[in-house]
Amino acid sequence: MDETEFWELVDTTREGAEGDPEEHADLLIERLTRLDPDSVLDFARHFESRYNRAYRWDLWGAAWVLLDGASDDAFDFFRCWLIGQGREVFEGALHDPDSLADLLDDFDEDLDGDGEELGYAADEAYEQLTGVVAPDLGIPPAAPEPEGTPVDFENESALMERYPKLWERFKNSR
């Protein structure tokens, strides 16, 4: 599976789920189980490599603003959700996390931002296909600390300065 096929699967299943992250994961599992196990592992490698690329302080700060706080686990699930939003949103957010204010049509704090189940979709599909747990993907784990300069999540003025568009659109609307 190449990168284009990866993003096509992400996009078509998200559209089919009408943006609901849990339904998205269910549809993704359904589609992945139509593939052979090696293709499912390829999908998992694509997903994991993007998940690791998104382990960055500046994205964590954006998640903090969007979610009104983001623990370690919440940021993990946010990164899965971010991948689930598709290539344009994902790459745009990596280029400039504040651009999420322009890239996201809507954001429902109770529904969006948590793609935990998306993170397990390939594992679930592989296990359904083979009856065994997916093997190690051979991808180096993310660094122990996020990449980049740490963000002081408790300093609202620093967050407003670093994420002016996100702050204006999502924090001021609460």
Image (cartoon, rainbow, N blue to C red):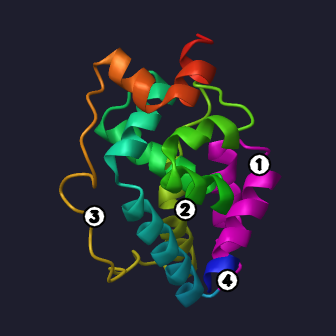
Look at the image and tell me whether residue 16 can be seen: yes
Where disc 3 sits, the SS reads: loop
29 relative to 72, above or below = below
Residue 142, numbered circle: 3
Where disc 4 sits, the SS reads: loop
The location of residue 45, given as percent across then percent down, is 46, 77
Bounds of the magenta span?
Answer: 6-35
Q: Amino acid at mark 4?
A: Leu
Where disc 1 sits, the SS reads: loop
Residue on which the image places disc 4: 35
For the point 41% across and 77% down, the residue is 134
Q: Is residue 160 left or right of residue 18?
A: left
Q: CA distance from mark 3 to mark 1?
A: 29 Å
Query: The C terminus appears in which quarter of the rendering?
Result: top right
Where disc 2 sits, the SS reads: helix
The location of residue 92, given as percent across then percent down, is 59, 54
Q: Earlier in the sequence, mark 2 or mark 1?
A: 1
Q: CA distance from mark 3 to mark 4?
A: 27 Å
40 relative to 100, above or below = below
Residue 121, numbered circle: 2
Residue on which the image places disc 1: 17
